[in-house]
Image (cartoon, rainbow, N blue to C red):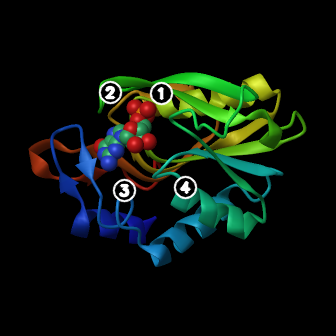
């Protein structure tokens, strides 16, 4: 998606060979126009998948997931990283290890909001080692629902998550796929991968 790649080139900060900071439009401040275009792009790519629900994880997945849900006309559910006092035991949970933060979070979703009849699209901001996406996929499995695929705003294709998930036969669509962050430069894979 060219507008997204341009934005990453203009405003992304390469913090290290592994980490890209995009706080000006995705992870802190949000660019609503770009999120709208991202939602339209995901909706187009998954339009024939029969999706009934979108599942993401707080907080940075919520904006792109919501715009996708708006276009597809389906509800958007986000997994919580901490147990809320108002959430009861009525939960599906999965453990997600974060390499960037070196911590494990139990993510949870109320059983009230995913049914076995649901066809679920997973959306997240980044795909790196795949732990967040695999946690969401695990929750869909626990619910007995179907997985339509995974939509990722920025994949870091030089890290193993994308391959690991695709190797399970799961459809992964990323809107920008980074081949390298070396020497402070963002290099994308050619469009066929992105
Ligand atoms: P994974 O579970 O695939 O290793 O990482 C996914 C999560 O880690 C994303 O939801 C995102 O919050 C965070 N993350 C991983 N790599 C990056 C990165 O390079 N930049 C930013 N801003 N977040 C990242």
The quarter of the picture showing ligand 1: top left
Residue at image mark 3: 27
| For residue 137, side relative to residue 114 (left or right) | left
* N-terminal-most mark, 1 or 2: 2
From the top left corner, tell me how far across and down residue 76 is, in percent: 69, 54
Q: Are marks 1 and 2 in contact (CB under 8 Å)?
A: yes
From the top left corner, tell me how far across and down residue 173 is, in percent: 56, 48
Q: Is residue 27 visible?
A: yes
User: Disc 1 to disc 2, how far (Cα)?
Assistant: 9 Å
Element marked by disc 1: helix
Q: Farthest residue in the front direction?
A: 85
Which mark, residue 62? Answer: 4
Residue at image mark 1: 131
Q: Residues within 10 Å of mark 3 (few under 14, many from 20)?
A: some
Q: Residue at left 23%, top 37%?
A: 18
Element marked by disc 4: helix
Q: Residue at left 64%, top 25%?
A: 93
User: Disc 2 to disc 3, how far (Cα)?
Assistant: 17 Å
């Amino acid at each position: 998606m060219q507008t997204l790649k341009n934005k990453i080139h203009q405003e992304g900060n390469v913090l290290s060979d592994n980490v890209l900071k995009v706080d000006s439009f995705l992870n802190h401040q949000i660019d609503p126009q770009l999120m709208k275009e991202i939602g339209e792009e995901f909706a187009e790519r998954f339009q024939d998948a029969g999706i009934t629900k979108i599942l993401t994880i707080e907080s940075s997945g919520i904006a792109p997931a919501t715009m996708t849900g708006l276009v597809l006309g389906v509800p958007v559910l986000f997994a919580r990283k901490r147990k809320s006092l108002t959430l009861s035991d009525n939960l599906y949970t999965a453990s997600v290890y974060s390499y960037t933060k070196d911590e494990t979070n139990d993510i949870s979703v109320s059983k009230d909001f995913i049914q076995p009849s649901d066809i679920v699209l997973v959306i997240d901001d980044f795909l790196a080692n795949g732990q967040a996406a695999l946690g969401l996929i695990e929750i869909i499995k626990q619910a007995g629902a179907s997985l339509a695929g995974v939509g990722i705003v920025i994949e870091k294709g030089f890290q193993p998550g994308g391959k690991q998930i695709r190797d399970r036969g799961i459809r992964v669509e990323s809107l920008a796929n980074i081949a390298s962050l070396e020497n402070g430069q963002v290099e994308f894979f050619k469009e066929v991968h992105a």
